[in-house]
Image (tube, rainbow, N blue to C red):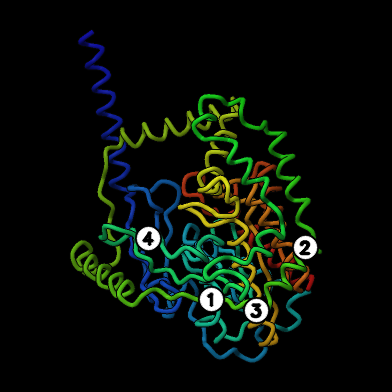
Amino acid sequence: MTAQILTIVILLAFIELAGKTYAYFNPGYENLYAIPDRVVGWRLTPNLEYIHTGSHWYENEFRVKVKHNSLGFRDSERSVSKPPGVTRIALLGDSSVSARQVAFKNTSGQTLEKLLNQNSRTKKSKIYEVLNFGIDGIGVGQSFLTYRQYASAFDPDYVFLFVFEGDIWRTVSPQSAITDKISSSRRLSIRPVFNIKSTPSESKGSFPNSLLKALNFSSFYQLLNNLDKKEIKPQVTSLPTEEEYVDLINSFKILITEKKIAEISKKLKPLDLLFFAPKQNIFDEFLNLQADRIKREYGGNRTKVREHEIFLVDLWGKLEFGLSKLKEMLKPELRLRREFDKLIKAYRPKRPGVLFGGNDNFSNFESVIFVNLKVLESLNRDIVNAGKKFIVVDASSHIIKHGRLPANLLSDILQKYCKVNDIGYIALSQTLNDAKNSGIQTLWPKDGHFNENGQRIFGEAMFEWVKES
């Protein structure tokens, strides 16, 4: 017995030593890659060069050399004035656009630029420049601000906006994980947010009821009320089956018609879009805390090697995660349970009798959708008034954050809203899902962002749109 224990101890010690050796030669890096921005909330740090390995303490899935330009974006240096004979394309969006998980040459923007300049049908003696204005962690509202503050000055002929489900919540949520990288006991409300002004007939601060009832998703909230979280954990059978869940999603998608979206667009037009900038004291606190941490922990730099952890603990966590995924493959009802746990947390009304009231964690789904549609309306107006074309790139039913049902509903709403309002639309989710079903991995399994395949498909989808336009 003693010999067996000793053998196990030696084996574990060897694994730990091997893991630490790998981590020593393949370290993870922690980077303060963003700076406070008074208009957008934050943007990438100008002229910063560093190695990005994700959030793990050692190099796990990728190791990418990242360089920001002098304006604070992951792009080449560009002249503000557009050279003669050049067609410019601006990409707006979050970390899926800045794409720090792949080499710059493999980003969607560079893929698009290369395809456009090589293709005889699109070239026609033109030169194309694709400018990347992606900023990690921002939402649809901040992309609108990025266009006004930065991208519009470069006179782009086309403006592509990447959207996934998480982006719409960022439009209305002032808190951001970007402040987790500074030493503070709380998340700072550093994000500028948007809302819609109440009509004179509505009480101050309330959302227009005529809009909330337009799509009539009340039965969704009632379902979540009925599926009490405490009851569904021990009784998987109380949950809908996979087939029933798909039928449920489709039953709600039927409610989203072009006629309804046209009516919603009409009701949104006279409403004022409200903008709320971060309070000056909060902005200053963010600025000061980051400066203090750079001095105290980073030695005046913005990048450092992450501290090593116990490799065996890390390995055990990966084994547990792998086993949980295996269980979900063998028992699909477990995946459904996790799905409905997320839905209940995000969308179940705080007060059962107030179905459209939202909860402490999330606002009502429809109200968030409509605020974002109002932002899209405003962004489109800016772009059209400049004589340019706006295109929404929708990945919301592929990169799913809070559940398949809301992600699919968002995709349908965006598609019909763009059609009704003459906005370009790319159903990127469909192409990505087709690739996934064909066995092509589009996301880094642990990091969750696009890998080289995902970025390539993203760039090719935009190229096809430009080629056919």
Residue 442 location (% of width, % of height) = 59, 50
- Give the class, few, some or many, for how many residues have Cα within 10 Å of label 3's Cα (few <14, many ≥20): many
Residue tagged 1: 274
Q: Earlier in the sequence, mark 3 or mark 1?
A: 3
Q: Is disc 2 in contact with disc 4, using a CB cutoff of under 8 Å?
A: no
> Distance between the Cα atoms at labels 4 and 3?
29 Å
Residue tagged 2: 260
Q: Nearer the viewer, mark 1 or mark 4?
A: 1
- Residue 427 is left or right of residue 191, and the answer is right
- Give the class, few, some or many, for how many residues have Cα within 10 Å of label 2's Cα (few <14, many ≥20): some
Report the disc number at residue 159: none
Residue tagged 4: 51
| Secondary structure type for disc 3 | strand
> Distance between the Cα atoms at labels 3 and 2?
38 Å
Residue 296 location (% of width, % of height) = 18, 64
> Distance between the Cα atoms at labels 2 and 4?
48 Å
Nearest the viewer among 22 and 465 is: 465
Against 364, residue 278 (above or below) is: below
Report the disc number at residue 128: 3
